[in-house]
Image (cartoon, rainbow, N blue to C red):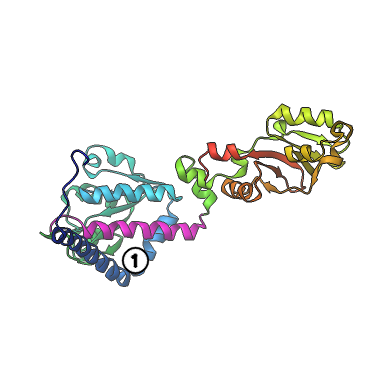
Amino acid sequence: MALNAPELMPRNAAQDIIAHGREVLRVEAEALSSFVDMLDENFAKATQAILNSRGHLIVSGMGKSGHIARKIAATFASTGTPSLFVHPGEASHGDLGKITNADVVLLLSNSGETPELADLIAYTRKKGNTLIGVAARAESTLLKKSDIAILLPQAPEACPNGLAPTTSTTLTLALGDALAVALMNMRGFTPENFRDFHPGGKLGAILATVGDLMHGKDDLPMVDISTPMPEVLIAITSQGFGVAGVRDADGRLAGIITDGDLRRHMANLLAHKAGDVMTPDPVTITAEARASDALAVMNRKKVTTLFVMDSQHRPEGIIHVHDCLRAGVA
């Protein structure tokens, strides 16, 4: 028996724990469902105000709302809306200077009476910033002083004491997602735009294009149709791709020569010309295609390289399966 193996939990205890977990999810799901029906024109006004802003979106909140505010600001920034989190405590000690007159300010407070937000509210009123307030009490100070008030449903928190921010933070987080996605739709935000902000990690690899990973014209192993095979062999080995491209008189790709082509023409191989040995009309790809699509083509066709074509069907690069794997494309 393994050392320090955990004791098996009695089935009744496990079922109780699962029941508590399901209850939390049920409470929060019901709150989200009620929020769907409450969303009104103020949501549209908030989205339009952020879209029209010539500055940044400033997001702030205190405590757990502050953690949600940080995430919302990060989501906006990564989806095409310049956004910053400003801590309300630090704002009162100099960070109000981060807010320009062109900025839109989004303040989060479930009660709408968070005292630490008072200086931020006063500053936006003095400077004329558009203030979007988010709270669960329509008569709260925050919503009454806001230019655009988004009311959260007064749903119970999911914790057993009804105190820990759980449902309220879920609602605010979902609202931030809804605003960010609405703005993405209004801007026509594309996967290519998304990759501009996510060049690293798995997302960057998924969104990488062939042009990002390919080897350029200087690395292309190219020969003419009339090139003698001894010279073709040198071209194949010199670049290390295990292949040579064969161009026609107009510089277009007429075919390729691989190890398989060499084996099929072993008899008197060196007496042949490139055009005699090549496989015509090979599978190619464009620089604008996703690297993941290039890898899928290579896997499907059981090849290790693809020539990259320009609009005139002239080779402008080459991509190898190892280029995709090194970049984390899978």
Say which residue label 1 marks: 42
| Residue at left offset 65%, top offset 46% | 302
User: Where 270 falls versus 168 (above or below)?
Assistant: above
The one of 57 and 272 positioned closer to us in this rendering: 272
Q: Position of residue 221 (x, y in %)?
A: 74, 33
The magenta span reads: 163-189
Q: Is residue 111 left or right of residue 96?
A: left
Predominant SS along the magenta part = helix
Exactly how many numbered labels are in the figure?
A: 1
Q: Quadrant of residue 27?
A: bottom left
Q: Quadrant of residue 212?
A: top right
Does the rendering let one see residue 253? no
Does the rendering let one see residue 33? yes
Q: Is residue 53 left or right of residue 36?
A: right
| Residue at left offset 35%, top offset 48% | 73
**Which residue ends up furthest to the bottom in the rendered image?**
37
User: Where 157 falls versus 94 (above or below)?
Assistant: below
